Image (spheres, rainbow, N blue to C red):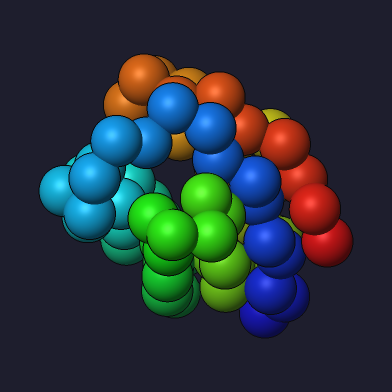
């Protein structure tokens, strides 16, 4: 398992953060997602053997937000 921090832009409220967490945590290979609206970022713990960073980025983008890897 590894943790990566992704910078999110386009969130308007805490419900946006909850939507991102819900989508990511329903994804095979993602153990935990902690999205912080105030910091405009999400920390994702995932199994890199089961899911690639690019897939996580795609999931976030499909929920309607822009994303970049911070860490």
- The spot of residue 19 in percent (x, y) is 22, 45
For image coordinates 37% across by 36% down, the residue present is: 11
Q: Residue at x 43, y 59 (%)?
A: 38
Quadrant of residue 36 within the rendered picture: bottom left
**Picture quadrant of residue 21:** bottom left
Q: Residue furthest right?
A: 71
Q: Quadrant of the C terminus?
A: bottom right
- Residue 58, percent across and down? 54, 26
Residue at the spot 65% in from the left edge and 46% down from the top edge: 7
Is residue 25 depicted above or below 1 in this figure? above
Q: Position of residue 63 (x, y in %)?
A: 32, 26
Viewer-nearest residue: 11 or 5: 11
Q: Is residue 32 left or right of residue 25?
A: right
Examine the rendered structure and indicate whether residue 3 appears above or below residue 69: below
Quarter-of-image position of residue 13:
top left
**Residue extending farthest left:** 15
Query: Of residues 8 and 55, which is closer to you in this image?
Result: 8
Relative to residue 5, is residue 36 drawn left or right?
A: left
Q: Is residue 45 above or below residue 64?
A: below
- Is residue 52 something that shows in the picture? no
Location of the N terminus (image quadrant): bottom right
Q: Position of residue 67 (x, y in %)?
A: 62, 33
Residue 28 in view, yes or no: yes
* Front residue (pair 40, 29): 40
Which residue is nearer to you in this view: 71 or 48? 71
């Amino acid at each position: 398992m590894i943790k990566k921090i992704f910078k999110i832009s386009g969130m308007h409220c805490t419900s946006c953060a909850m939507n991102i967490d819900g989508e990511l945590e329903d994804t095979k290979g993602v153990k935990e997602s902690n999205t912080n609206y105030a910091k405009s970022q999400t920390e994702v713990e995932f199994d890199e053997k089961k899911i690639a960073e690019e897939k996580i980025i795609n999931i976030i983008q499909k929920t309607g937000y822009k994303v970049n890897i911070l860490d």
